[in-house]
Amino acid sequence: MTLDTFDHAILTLLRQNARLSISEIAKQVNLSRSAVSQRMTRLEQTGIITGYHAALSLSSSAVRAYLIAIFQTPNCRSYGKRLGIYPEVKHAHSVAGDLDLLIFVEAPSMERLSQIRDEISAWSEVSSIKTYPLLADVLGSCP
């Protein structure tokens, strides 16, 4: 599916605030409410919009980390589905190079991060997994 500038504008607004009304989105992108509603339905049906989520603040003890996974047989789509059972896994990207998946985790504690890592590491297809906890966001805010 090809996205046009209106689709991108709608997606940008929804990323910023998933609770915006269709009327407010229509006003901001300069389309009718029915046009925005149709576009959002199409974006949902094609799987570009997979849901609407609340952004929750993490406690001060929360841990953010990247897990880098290498698999014996790269089949990133099936691994992505398996990662979906962990609400703490926020992103999982297949990447080019020496690794297969770059997994971003936001866990409430180091103990939970370790548990998730151990469970993924136990998958028979995993050759290796490395953990990189985040220390600070050097562009501004700190985790």
Image: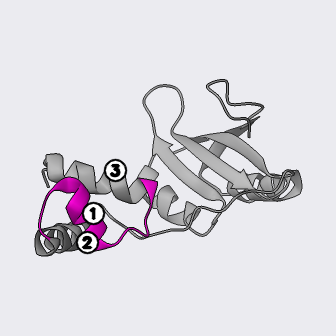
Q: Is residue 35 left or right of residue 143?
A: left
Say which residue label 2 marks: 23
Determine the secondary structure under disc 1: helix
User: What amino acid is labelled 1 in the image?
Assistant: Ile
Q: How many numbered marks have been drawn onto this rendered protein structure?
A: 3
Residue under label 1: 25
Tell me residue 83's x, y (percent): 57, 61
Q: CA distance from mark 2 to mark 3?
A: 16 Å
Front position in the image: 90 or 124: 90
Q: Are marks 2 and 1 in contact (CB under 8 Å)?
A: yes
Q: Which residues are magenta?
A: 16-32
| Left or right placement of residue 91 versus residue 111 in this view | left
- Residue sitting at 35 percent across and 55 percent down? 13
Q: Residue at x 44, y 54 (%)?
A: 16
Q: Earlier in the sequence, mark 3 or mark 1?
A: 3
Task: Name the spot of residue 79 as percent of width and height, x first.
Answer: 51, 57
Residue 127 visible in the picture: yes
- Measured from the top left, where is residue 100 in percent x and y? 51, 38
